[in-house]
Structure formats: structure tokens, C-alpha cells
Amino acid sequence: EPEVTQTPSHQVTQMGQEVILRCVPISNHLYFYWYRQILGQKVEFLVSFYNNEISEKSEIFDDQFSVERPDGSNFTLKIRSTKLEDSAMYFCASSEARPHTGELFFGEGSRLTVL
Amino acid sequence: QQQVKQSPQSLIVQKGGISIINCAYENTAFDYFPWYQQFPGKGPALLIAIRPDVSEKKEGRFTISFNKSAKQFSLHIMDSQPGDSATYFCAASPPNAGGTSYGKLTFGQGTILTVHP
């Protein structure tokens, strides 16, 4: 069964460092998303991406964040200068293009710990 | 206005019992209401979803009840099993204008369901 894969599963970094989280969406999907979940809190939308550009972003997704699809398979989330409050589980998700049923397929997440 | 409020935070039921989780939303523009199930160490997975043109949708032991006028929807798990023990999230999204809007989910806080054997 096709799945969304994310790497790394866990990353520990120092405050102020850059972090790149990687995702391989399901191969025939064209819509990509990043969500995050701070420990004990709800899952929050960060950004959606389609046709090589950001479609929507939340207020959380400030200038410290960027997304990229550098090749035909990977979808990355970069945090330029990490803060303590960026510590969270980051989920990548993808969905089909036609029709857009609304079902998002989530990866298992990348846990980011900022010290 | 974008909030989705979910209750209870945690729920313990006996095997064979009915689990009921409730959600309320504020934004009348929401057009799609999925429930996601999350096991420890895994990402959320779609369980069942409903659109506001119907009041109920059933898939196996899982039923969504939807009350548009009250802006509430609930998940009922019949004959709950220990394997149903997980965190359940309700969510809502706006209409699919522009292509990705369905994916802009607003999640509830989650309910940790424990089903005792």
C-alpha cells in the first residue's frame, strides 16, 4: 500500500540552527501539506503546496519556514533558524488531484526537538 | 471563528460498548468534516468523513451524525474493541476552492479513547 514517508523520524538541534525535514509523498499525488503537532496539543495546518507553489499558509508559517519540491519525489520543510517553540511533531501529507476527495494521507511524522 | 471544539478529552469504555465523541464548529463556511484516527507513533489516518448535505454516514461500526443547524457533529463507535484504542481527531475544512482548500484542515483537540477488554 502506498504511503507517505518522512525523514528523519527524530531530529535534535540547537536553537538558531537550520533544519530540513524531508517527505516523499505518494507518487501520483499532486497536493502536499505540512502540519505540526506540539506535544499534547492539536494538529495544526502549516502550509499547502500545489503546482510548485504555496497555495495557502497559516499564520504559524512565517518567514522562518519555507517549503520546496526540489525534484519529482521529495517535498521539504525548512526551518531557517529554529526556536524552542518549534519543538513539535511535523507531519507531511499528500492528496490526490482528480478528484480531490478531501482525504489526506499522513506520514508518520518527524519529531523535532530544539534545545 | 476557525475553531473546532472536541470533547471529551479522554474516554474509557468497555469492550462492546458505544464510544461517542462530539465536535462543534463555528465557521459556517466549513464544508467537509472528517474524523482521523491516530495510533501512537503513527500519523493520523482518515476514518470516515461527511459533507453537510447529509445528516448521517455509516461505515461498518463507525457512524458520523451531523447537525448543521447546531453546527455539531459526532462520531459513534459501536461495539468498541480494544483495537479501537487510539486518539481520535475531528476536523473541518472549507470548500475546495482553488484545489487545496480541502486539505486545510482545522483539527479538534483530540480524544484519547481507551477500550478495556
Image: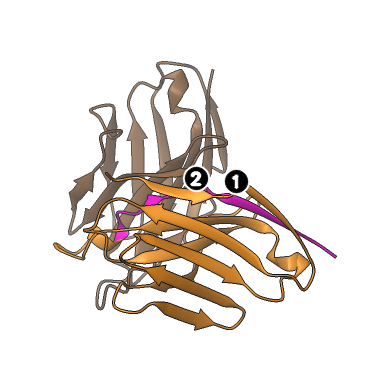
Chain colours: A brown, B orange
Residue sitting farthest toward the front: B69
B53 inside magenta stretch: no
Q: Position of residue A93 (x, y in %)?
A: 40, 57
For residue B89, side relative to residue A17 (left or right): right
In primary-sequence order, the first of circles 2 and 1 is 1
Residue sitting farthest toward the left: B98
- In this rendering, the answer to whether A110 lies above or below B27 is above
Q: Which residue is mark 2?
A: B109
Determine the chain carrying the residue at label 1: B
Q: Position of residue A57 (x, y in %)?
A: 23, 43
Q: Can see residue A24? A: no
Check disc 1 and give the amino acid type.
Answer: Gln
* Magenta extent: B103-117
- Whether labels 2 and 1 belong to a single chain: the reply is yes
Determine the chain carrying the residue at label 2: B
For residue B93, side relative to residue A89 (left or right): left
Q: Quadrant of residue A51?
A: bottom left
Q: Which mark is residue B9?
A: 1
For residue B77, side relative to residue A112 (left or right): right
State the SS at label 2: loop
Check disc 2 and give the amino acid type.
Answer: Gln
Look at 48% across and 43% down and name the residue there: A42
For residue B81, side relative to residue B94 (left or right): right
Q: Position of residue B47 (x, y in %)?
A: 52, 69
What is the distance, in whole Å, between disc 2 and disc 1 at their CAs? 7 Å
- In this rendering, the answer to whether A59 lies above or below B97 is above
State the SS at label 1: loop
